[in-house]
Image (cartoon, rainbow, N blue to C red):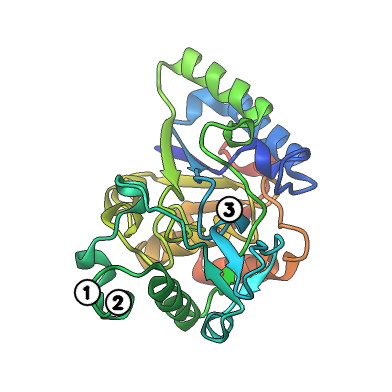
């Protein structure tokens, strides 16, 4: 059987000592590493996603300032609603300059109608965009804008893979002659990507649904999924995979329940996710039973 191990965001910032730590992530990582070491020759492919943010990201404090002119940034875990933006409670900082590369680019072919994000002169308005973004986000029913602690900044120590998994996949690569496939997400400052498959509000081709990745995962006879966090990026990545997976083959997807944990305070979201996936036919399994004898 062709087996793929999908490790979602196994990065230091999501582990104890990181800026957005999941308390039990180190234990999850040790079990992931043990699985790789024990069954390395039976794992044909390892795909690892990496949350990858610039500092001035729409989900980070420095992107926003209070609307009262104080220049204050919102505290981490502040929720910014469309109503807050209409009321002027928060707004994007006035001196924010969009990058010229893909990390700040918008594609009308992906985003769609640009009318609500242009000013009277037909020029892109960041304030108008943020309001339209918040409305589209809320209309999908999953999220409002959440301001997270700065995390997984590209080039920072927190962006790196946690040591136990890094060592295990290095050994796997050396032993098997195979290379880990890396999937970066979250670089575009204008939208958040909880799912590695797509942003909730796609704004460019790089944030639209990743058809090539999904098609390649479909070639696996067994897809093992683990990583951080069960409440967020594992949750929405797997949901997006399942939504595009043949309904009679979802039993090929195995969610390793002892290799992922919820962000504190979001345990209910993780529980709902697991129940939904089990109902959809995904197999919930511990890593010790993940591979056939």
Q: Are marks 2 and 1 in contact (CB under 8 Å)?
A: yes
Residue at 70% from the left image edge and 60% from the top image edge: 76
Q: What is the residue that sits farthest to the left in this orientation?
A: 109
In the drawing, what numbered circle is on residue 206?
A: none
Where is residue 246? Give x, y as percent: 34, 64
Q: Of 110 and 190, which appears nearest the observer?
A: 190
Which residue, given by chain and number where applicable, does mark 3 sit on?
A: 255
Q: Is 101 drawn above or below residue 247 in the view shown?
A: above
Q: Where is residue 240, by image quadrant?
A: bottom left
In the drawing, what numbered circle is on residue 122?
A: 1
Residue at 27% from the left image edge and 55% from the top image edge: 205
Asked which secondary structure carries label 1, the reply is loop
Which residue, given by chain and number where applicable, does mark 2 sit on?
A: 119
Counting other residues with Cα less than 10 Å from the Cα at mark 1, is it few (<14), some (14-19), or many (20 or more)? few
Report the mark closest to the observer, 1 or 3. 1
Counting other residues with Cα less than 10 Å from the Cα at mark 2, is it few (<14), some (14-19), or many (20 or more)? some
């Amino acid at each position: 059987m062709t087996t793929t191990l999908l490790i979602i965001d196994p990065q230091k910032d999501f582990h104890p000592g990181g800026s957005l730590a999941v308390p039990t992530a180190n234990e999850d990582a040790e079990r992931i590493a043990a699985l790789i070491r024990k069954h390395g020759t039976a794992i044909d492919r390892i795909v690892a996603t990496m949350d990858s943010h610039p500092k001035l990201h729409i989900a980070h404090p420095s992107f926003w300032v209070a609307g009262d002119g104080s220049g204050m940034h919102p505290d981490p875990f502040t929720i910014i609603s469309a109503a807050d933006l209409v009321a002027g409670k928060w707004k994007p900082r006035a001196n924010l300059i969009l990058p010229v590369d893909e990390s700040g680019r918008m594609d009308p072919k992906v985003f769609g109608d640009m009318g609500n994000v242009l000013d009277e002169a037909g020029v892109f308005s960041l304030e108008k965009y943020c309001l339209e973004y918040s409305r589209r986000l809320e209309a999908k029913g999953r999220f409002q804008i959440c301001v997270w602690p700065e995390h997984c900044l590209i080039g920072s120590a927190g962006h790196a893979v946690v040591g136990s998994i890094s060592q295990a996949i290095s050994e796997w690569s050396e032993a098997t002659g195979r290379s880990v496939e890396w999937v970066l997400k979250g670089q575009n400052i204008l939208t958040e990507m909880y799912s590695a498959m797509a942003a909730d509000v796609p704004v460019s081709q790089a944030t639209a649904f990743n058809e090539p990745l999904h098609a390649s995962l479909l070639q696996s006879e067994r897809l093992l999924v683990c990583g951080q966090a069960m409440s967020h990026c594992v949750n929405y990545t797997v949901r997006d995979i399942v939504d595009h997976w043949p309904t009679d083959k979802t039993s090929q997807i195995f969610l390793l329940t002892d290799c992922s944990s919820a962000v504190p305070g979001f345990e209910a979201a993780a529980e709902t996710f697991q129940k939904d996936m089990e109902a959809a036919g995904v197999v919930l399994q511990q890593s010790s039973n993940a591979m056939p004898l």
